[in-house]
Image (spheres, rainbow, N blue to C red):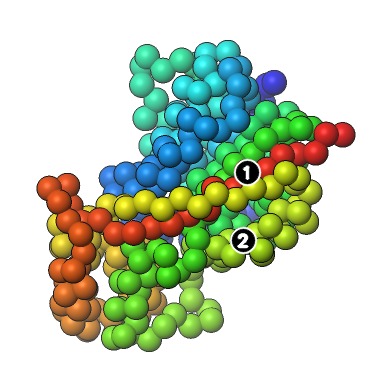
Amino acid sequence: MTIHAYPINTTKPSPLVDFWNTVLAPKFITYRHILVGGLSQHSAAIMPRLDIAEGDQILDIGCGFGDTAIALADHTGPKGEVLGVDCCQAFIDLARQSISQDQPDNVRFICHDVENGLAASDFDFVFARFGTMFFVNPVAGLKAMRAAMKPGGRMAHIVWRNREDNPWLISARDVVQSILPKPGENALTCGPGPFSMADETVLRGQMEAAGYCDIAFERLDAKVLVGRTVEEAIAFQLAIGPAGETFREGGLLAEEKRSEVEVALAEMFRGVESDEEGLWMDSSSWIVTARNPEE
């Protein structure tokens, strides 16, 4: 395995990738402490049970700030290697900074749009936490992941389940959209959206079309932090996710109604569970595992 033969993305970034790098990445970085803490509730629960052997070569798709890639590197050990890939250069820069001095030299990060394919095709295991939902073409993206795997290779990806079981993202959206119009068809968005793979039947069909076998679904529910204070929770929702998209697309009208929106969100958050760490809301994901058929 030679993951040091990095794929070089020489194509012009798609408008979606451009949007992630210029508009969304700074917002995600601002709330990195909330996002990593919340998302890790889902990956940490499954990480010890992943079908990873010592010495495995692992690909982490949409690795973000690098916490999952570093955790995967601990699982495969110094004889294995992990390649973390994300389309946002700022995320990759922070991921590289996250590698501790005593971390074995078995994890690397590159900036690349996985939907354009990868040069390597001999990974034992491919992983993605809340990244595959943003594929512009889900089947093509899943095929690109499978093309990077050895025959018989394994994979796991985590995606959000349906909206009603994810109030941490949807409750604020409903509040904001009671005051502001919904984003139009031409709105600048993060892609298909966080719930594009929520339906088990649809996603199973996409994975079968991409050539996977032994597909299995496991539901995972977890409380996630949405802010250390009500004020931070409001700012977080107005920056990221469906509520943030609605507010961003609202433009001048949104700014005119900011006070009204913030008061309404504060009222919503008054009923949310809280402790000394902050405010917690329900979330729900699918942990999907599958295999690349043997040749």
Kindly identify the residue that appears in the image at 59 percent across and 65 percent down: 199
Q: Where is residue 192 in the image (x, y as percent from the top left)?
A: 56, 66
Residue 98 occupies which quadrant of the picture? top left
Q: Position of residue 153 (x, y in %)?
A: 71, 33
Disc 1 marks which amino acid?
Answer: Thr
Q: Which of 67 and 287 is in front in this view?
A: 287
Kindly identify the residue that appears in the image at 71 percent across and 53 percent down: 207
Q: Which structural element holds mark 2?
A: helix
Contact between marks 2 and 1 (CB within 8 A): the answer is no
Q: Is residue 76 placed above or below 112 in the rendered structure?
A: above
Question: Quarter of the image containing the N terminus?
Answer: top right
Kindly identify the residue that appears in the image at 67 percent across and 35 percent down: 154
3 left or right of 22 in image: right
Residue 102 occupies which quadrant of the picture? top left
- Earlier residue among tags 2 and 1: 2
Q: Is residue 259 visible?
A: yes
Q: Mark 2 points at which residue?
A: 200
Q: Mark 1 points at which residue?
A: 289
Q: What label does residue 29 carry, if any?
A: none
Q: Is residue 131 visible?
A: no
Count of numbered badges drawn on the protein:
2
Q: Nearer the viewer, residue 205 or 266?
A: 205
